[in-house]
Image (cartoon, rainbow, N blue to C red):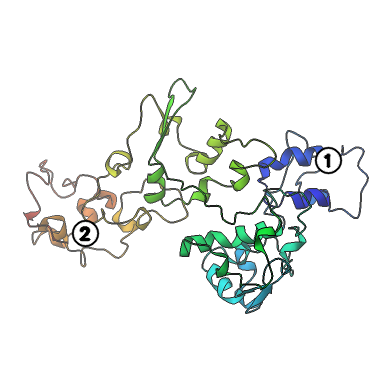
Amino acid sequence: MNKKISKWCINLPLILLLPVLLVSAQSHDDRVPDASKPPCSDCHVCQVPTETNPCLEMCVRMGAQPAEAHSAAEGPEVTVIDELAQLYAPVDFNHKLHAEMVGMGEGCSVCHHYSPPGKFPSCSECHSDHPSEPQSLRQPGLKGAYHRQCMGCHREWSHDTKCIFCHLPANGIDFSVAPIDSTDILGISHPVITEPEKKVWTTPYSEGPVVTFHHQEHIDLFELRCVDCHQGENCSYCHDLEKEARLGKTDAEIHAICNDCHGEDPCATCHDTREKPAFTHAANGGWELNRFHKGLSCRACHPTGRKIGKLSGRCSDCHGGWNQENFRHAVTGLQLDEIHIELDCGDCHIDLIYGNTPDCSGCHDDGRTHEDAPPGHEVQASS
């Protein structure tokens, strides 16, 4: 990949890079090794990439390091941003404070999205400060890059982005005549995007044309982040200075997103002949939550980082320390009598699956059940 393309694709989603990479590549039969260029293996994992199978490595923003690769201690306490000092007063940037804040999230790569091992390139190495050079939303000019990097957080915290927050007044500088950077976002307030509660699509799948996606449910109940589904959707996904934006996704792209969680589910999980209702634990989970579990988040029982699936029904999966000595059976609304309180839990609850009906046949062969011959007496259920 030549230098021009390398710089151009820093923020470009991989799927959009394929045509560029394929067009820029020579045929492998005619290729002459060039020591000045990176080896093909930097991007391709197979010996002979083809158009149908390019064997591309995932492009991680052109050299970005993992969040744990750097720490706040490596950087200066304060740094002066003065590349545009001829137009604006230099900015005294409290690097230490900001580095400590991003340490709570994705780390240094939030700002240093291109940082080869052992090096933190200056922003101007990739983002031009020359207004005469054509700009692109994929790789904004220096002024645009600064504002895009900083203003998102400042808008979130203060709901205002007055220039004075970062720029001290500079005598003799007329801000009105500063060169216009078409990639800048200063003074532009993006319209508020309201998260839909749900979206319903009609698809060409004849056996189940209707797909209901409960958007808010996936955020609030299943705790998905926006980026979990909207990967690679930077500004240019909707806005492009060179061509009309493509706002819709193909069926293949939509399935690729949903399959991260639903890859092994049958089509009927999403597709139906009518609109599907919202998730309920009783209907979809197979168990109606009782008062002890209604207030819990899904992840309190379903492990973080794994697809939410049906549990075994064993209380011991979460309550490993429970036994007949320390568990107060009265909380269920049934106080065991003196005979049954001495029994092991598994004597009545076969295989310790408490969602199933208790089985009395292990001790009684007269066909009695827990309903016609209760192993105790009902009490007011406690918490």
Location of residue 183 in the rendering, given as x and y in whole percent from the top left corner:
66, 51
Helix, strand, or loop for circle 2?
A: loop
- Quadrant of the rendered image containing residue 49: top right
Disc 1: CA contacts within 10 A as few (<14), some (14-19) or many (>=20)? some
**Quadrant in which residue 346 is drawn:** bottom left
What type is the residue that disc 1 sits on?
Answer: Ala
Give the quadrant of residue 211. Answer: top left
**Residue lying at 70% horizontally and 39% vertically, measured from the top left:** 242
Examine the rendered structure and indicate whether residue 251 appears above or below residue 81.
above
Name the one closer to the observer, 286 or 221.
221
Return the mark for residue 25.
1
Q: Which of marks 1 and 2 is in front?
A: 1
Q: In this view, does 293 lie above or below 106?
A: above
Residue sitting nearer the eye, 330 or 223: 223
Residue that protrudes farthest toward the top in the picture: 206
Disc 1 secondary structure class: loop
Taking depth in this image into account, of 342 and 352 the one nearest to the observer is 352
Q: Is residue 152 left or right of residue 345?
A: right
The residue where tag 2 is placed is 344
Amino acid type of the residue that numbered disc 2 sits on in the rendered structure: Asp
Mark 2: few, some, or many residues within 10 Å (few <14, many ≥20)? few
Separation of residues labelled 1 and 2 (CA atoms) = 71 Å
Residue ID at (59%, 76%)? 96
**Could you say where residue 109 lies in the image, as x and y percent from the top left?**
63, 63
Q: Can residue 244 be seen in this view?
A: yes
